[in-house]
Amino acid sequence: MSERVASFWKWMEAQDVVDMDKVCVQPEVLSTGIGFVAKRDISRGESTLSVPKTLFMNVESALESPIGEYCTELKPWLILALHLLHEKSSSDSKWSPYIEILPETLDLPLFWSDEELSELQGTQVLESSLNYRSYVQMEYEELATQLFEPNPEVFPPEVFTPGALLWAFGILRSRTFEPFTADQIALVPGLDLFDHSSQSQSCWSSKGGFGPFQKEGAAVVAEESVSAGTEVRMNYNPEIVAPQLMLDYGFYPSGDRKGGYQLTLGIPPEDKYFDDKADMAELAGLGETWPFMLRAGEAVPDEMRIYLRLIQLSGTDSFLLE
C-alpha cells in the first residue's frame, strides 16, 4: 500500500468509516490503479464498504463552503466541480487525504492529443470527446465573465483555470455513479475506488438513515461471493456499452462485444407544435432532446419509436397532441 493510499485509509478510519478489525476490503495499488482486495471471504449480500453522507462532496457541502454563496444559481455539476477545485487548493481541507489520491492526469479521450484522437476517426467516442471539450470551454468562459473575474479573491485565477475545470469535469465523469448523479451528483470518498467488471452485479446503492445506529450514505454490496485475496469489483453501469466506458473511464473491456451507439434525437425548435410536443415528451419522462442507446443485435427501444412518432406528428395527426 502506497503512502498516500495508507494516509487516505487512516483518514477513513478516523472518520469512523472503517474499523480495521472488521472491514472486509482494503485498498491496494493494482495494475489498473487503486482498487479493493478482499481481506477475507465475502458472502453474497454483505456490504463491502459503506460511506456516510457526511463524508460526501456534493452540492450541499459545496453550498456550505466559502464559495457556496457564489454558486447557488449554477448547474449541480459545476457547483461540485468548483467545490472540488476550491478544496484541492486549500491546505486545511477536510477532504485533503481523499483529494491527494485523485489522479492529476486522466487517461480519457477527453485529454488525448490530436494525434492520439486521430486514431478514433469515424467513431462516436471522438465526436463525444470533442463535444465535451467544447462544452466545458463554453461553461468556463461564462464562469470567467460572470463569476471568476468579478471575484478574484474567492476564485483565484491561478486555481480556476480552463485546464482545472476540464480536469474536474473528467474527475466527475469518471468517479460518480448512479444514484448519485445529475441533481444528486456526489463524490463519495472510497466508494469510487472499486474497479469495473461487466460480470459484476454490484453497484453503488443509497443507504437510508433510519434507526438510532443507521447513517444515511452509500454502499457497495457484494452481489456475488468473493474469495479472500481477490479484487472486489463493481459494475459502473449494467446498461452501458463499451464505447461509453472508453469515453468516460478510458478503457475498452477486453473481449467485450457489447457494442452500441447513443443517438440523441430532439424536437425541432422551429416546429409549430414545439410547445405541445415538449409537454407530451415531459409527461412521458423525456425531454426536448433525449439520448437513446442502440445496441448491437437488439431491437430499437420502444421509447425511441414513440419519440420519433411524436417528432413527426403534423397536419391531420396534430389532433393527437390535444
Image (cartoon, grey):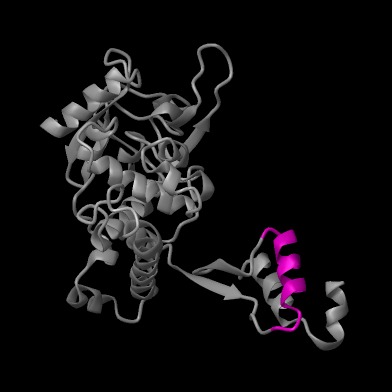
Q: Position of residue 48 (x, y in %)?
A: 38, 27
Chief SS of the magenta region: helix
Residue drawn where x is 48% and y is 26% of the image: 45
Q: Position of residue 9 (x, y in %)?
A: 23, 26
Q: Is residue 316 above or below residue 244?
A: below
Q: Report the side of 26 relative to 53 (left or right).
A: left
Q: Report the side of 7 relative to 135 (left or right).
A: left
Q: Nearer the viewer, residue 95 or 289?
A: 95
Q: Position of residue 204 (x, y in %)?
A: 45, 38
Q: Is residue 22 above or below residue 280?
A: above
Asked if residue 197 can be seen in this view, the reply is no
Q: Residue furthest left?
A: 3
The quarter of the image holding the N terminus is: top left
Q: Quadrant of residue 40?
A: top left
Residue drawn where x is 21% and y is 48% of the image: 103
Asked if residue 91 can be seen in this view, the reply is yes
Q: Quadrant of residue 121?
A: bottom left
Number of numbered discs on residues? 0
The quarter of the image holding the C terminus is: bottom right
Q: Position of residue 276 (x, y in %)?
A: 77, 72
Q: Nearer the viewer, residue 190 or 238?
A: 190
Span shown in magenta: 271-285
| Magenta stretch encompasses residue 219 | no
Residue drawn where x is 29% and y is 65% of the image: 110
Residue drawn where x is 68% and y is 76% of the image: 308
